[in-house]
Structure formats: C-alpha cells, structure tokens
Amino acid sequence: MAEGRVRGGFNQYGFTVGILMLDTRFARIAGDMGNAGTFPFPVRYHRVAGADPDLVVRRGAEGLLPAFVEGARALEREGVGAITTNCGFLIKFQHQLADSVRVPVFTSSLLLVPLVARLLSPGRLVGILTVNGAALTPAHLAGAGIGPEIPIAVAGMETEKEFTRVMLDNEMVLDVDQAREEHVRVTRRLMSEHPDLGAIVLECTNMPPYADDIRRETGLPVFDIVSLVTLAHGALASAIGPRPVA
C-alpha cells in the first residue's frame, strides 16, 4: 500500500513491460506472449496496424519501422518501464527502437543468445529454434549481438506442416497437439545433428507454450521471450509507481 505523497503523470499504473504486437488473428494459447494470462503480472499491449506476420518474417518488415517507433513511443507515454515485441525477427529494429525512447527495449529473445553462450562450457553450442530458419539472416543475428565467435545451431519450423503455416499465414485454427509434436520432432533433429548442444533459445514468441515439452525431450535449459519479460519485470517491479515525491 502506498504511503505519504506520490507523484502522478500517467493515466494508468502497474505495468512494467509494454509489448508491441503484430497485427494478427491467430489463436494465442496460454504460454503465448500475446495471451495476457501467460504472465503473473500485468503487461501493456499495443497493436501495430499493418504488421502482418508474413511481412515481418518472410519479407523483412519492409516499411514498418515508423509504425513500430510510434508504437514504442505510445507505450512509453503510457508509463511502461520497458518495451518488447511479439516477434523475434524484429531484432533488426533493436537499435532504432532503443534510440526512439528513454526506457529499455528488448525486441527479441535472440538477445539472450550471447548471455546463454557464456553460461556454457567451451565447445557447447546454443541451439536456436525459429519459426523460419530460411528467413533468419545474418542481419538478424548481428542485431542481437550474435557474432561468429558465438557457436550456434539453428533449426527452423518451416519444414513442418502446422505451426509455421498457421503463424505466418495468420490462420484462424491451430492444432495445438500437432504443433507440440512438431516442436519435439524438430528439437530431436537439432539434437541429433548437434549432440554438443548446451542450451536452446526459442526465437519465436509463439513457442513458449511448448518450452516444457522441449525441456523434457532434451534435458537442457530452454530460454524464450517469457524468460526475458519475466527478467525485465523483476528489474522494474518496485518502480512501477506512482513514485514517492522526493
């Protein structure tokens, strides 16, 4: 309970993290970043009109930077303490979005890869599971600070029939059981091709519902955007205000 004199300035309070959302209609199950029930704390959403998943992932988010900048500024005006996005491929806008606001910005779970690599013993790889491996370019990796000195192995879900199609084509119906099987199958392939994996980072913000399945399959630590949002919330929770008057 607040005590003493506190200072206002915003219309609403209690949000630590603001999330820039793609313009989508597909189902977002519990665990998905776009399902508010995923988090045990409130988050603030801002939908970026025209940010179609196919445009963002397969076509490089061409022409969308101004809309994301305005969305980030709108969330900042609403009082959030940090800003993220709900597509890991927006890592290509990391520097521009961070430069556009005064609060911290973390556009993608790919930002965790350099940290995770430093947690592992020499010779161990960081596996990256992505919605579309063919679309994940060196520019995306560079935006996350993933240089050639960081050993990674990438596996894309585009080889499967359900998950990537539903997400990128923005379809209304998702077969959750099939999507779960696909995540486990692609993870098995990644492990078979790279037995020296030490951890896995899930690029796609729609993958966290399947993170426990991947952990059980591999016995490895699995990191995702929910891990990162939770970390940011912990860093900000005591400052969500209203703050005391000095």
Image (spheres, rainbow, N blue to C red):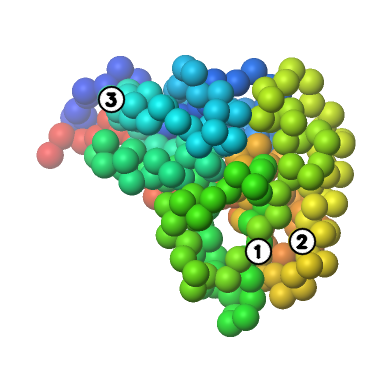
Residue at x-position 80% and y-position 52%: 186
| Residue under label 1 | 153
Location of the C terminus by quadrant is: top left
Given the image, on which type of amino acid does mark 3 rest? Arg
- Residue 244: % across, % down: 21, 36
User: Which circle, 3 or 1, is nearer the viewer?
Assistant: 1
Mark 3 vs mark 2: which is more N-terminal?
Answer: 3
- Residue 197: % across, % down: 70, 70
Front residue of 40/56: it is 56
- Whether pointer 2 and pointer 1 mark residues with C-beta atoms closer than 8 Å, the reply is yes
- Residue 22: % across, % down: 53, 26
C-alpha distance separating marks 3 and 2: 42 Å
Given the image, on which type of amino acid does mark 1 rest? Ala
Residue at x-position 60% and y-position 21%: 24
Residue at x-position 58% and y-position 48%: 136
| Residue under label 2 | 190
| Residue under label 3 | 77
